[in-house]
Amino acid sequence: MATETQRRTREKLGAESDRNLALELVRATEAAAISCSRYMGFGDKNQVDAAAVDAMRPVLGTVRMNGVVVIGEGEKDEAPMLYNGERVGDGSGPEWDIAVDPVDGTTLTAKSLPDAVSIIGVSPRGTMFSPGPAVYMQKLVVPGHAAHDVDLDAPIADNLLRIAAATDRAVSDLTVCVLDRARHAELVTAIRAAGARIRFLLDGDVAGAIMAVTPSTGVDLLVGVGGTPEGVLAACALRCLGGEMFGRLIARSDSERAAILDAGFDLDRTLTTTDLVSGDNVFFAATGVTDGSLLRGVRFESHRIVTQSLSMRSRSGTIRLIEGRHDPERSFLVNP
């Protein structure tokens, strides 16, 4: 039986390991953001994505962890690195599930548009939802205090009224994040008819989900249909921020419906944040690529590169805003 001293020693070592992991994840997102921002405005989203993946992978390889990519760049044949099922880390230490998007907003970066970020989410092995063939999901993201006031199946006008009443505001005071897609035409019309304002997202909705639960951004909720992998990544952040996501998998065709059902998923089930990421020790890191409401983008100054990142952990509830100043001649992140 372990002595009290041994137990405390293990707890101390575990806490130090967790603190190290939180910072190491930021190093990986910083590397991806710096590398891909070199191609900001060049118009080639594939070049942006490749640069981010090539920079992030070697940094993750130095991290003391035994990780498996659950949410990655796709299947192995489609993604030579950071593919679903790939093992990352140095192979030692705790086992983790990894969700990664080297650039959430490749098109935004290629066109020099706002809100592109580099993202990593980590949770204990076996606690992260793997979407399989379910590419898209319906989403409703709200702050934790509004979770009991909304219903995924309710008309958007009803949800807006409930949120307004719960926060002692008018519907016209609320701002809704929505991906700017043709599929949301009716949703946009309904939001406008209800009197709320809209913050359109041009690409990628993870940043929008975080904005919806962060008071300083001026966004009150996120609604609409977006990627399921992005939903899992957003859930990692929401576990740390105390926000809530309600979602439902969506099939775009009969063949996709059959594949989703064959994989054992229930298309009628409402998924919550803890369904998507059930671990009690979740980490999330993000670095701005282009300027946005959430984070500033990468800046190339005289003899230094400046980044802005978020580092979060669910167990401690700690949220850090980190400004990194990197020497382009010496930093491993810049010259891996």
Image (spheres, rainbow, N blue to C red):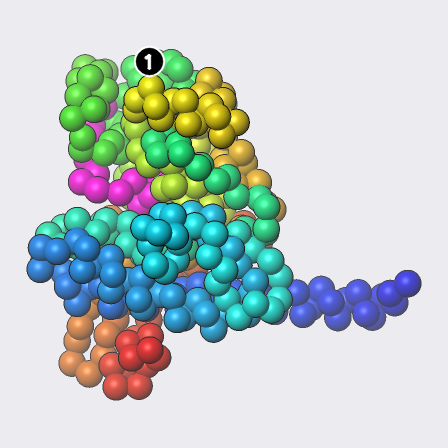
Residue 301 appears in which quarter of the rendering? bottom left
Q: Residue at x 60, y 58 (%)?
A: 95
Q: Does residue 143 show up?
A: no
- Say which residue label 1 marks: 155
Q: Residue at x 17, y 49 (%)?
A: 107
Image quadrant occupied by the C terminus: bottom left
Q: For residue 208: magenta?
A: yes
Depth check: give the residue in front, 64 or 10: 64
Depth check: give the residue in front, 96 or 220: 96
Image quadrant occupied by the N terminus: bottom right
Q: Compared with residue 110, is residue 11 higher up or lower down, i.e. above or below?
A: below
Q: For residue 214: magenta?
A: no
Q: Position of residue 293 (x, y in %)?
A: 24, 48
Residue range highlighted in magenta: 195-209
Horizontally, residue 157 falls left or right of residue 273, namely: left
Check disc 1 and report its element: helix, strand or loop: loop
Find the residue positioned furthest to the front: 77
Q: Amino acid at mark 1?
A: Pro
Horizontally, residue 217 falls left or right of residue 71, namely: left
Q: Position of residue 141 (x, y in %)?
A: 39, 32
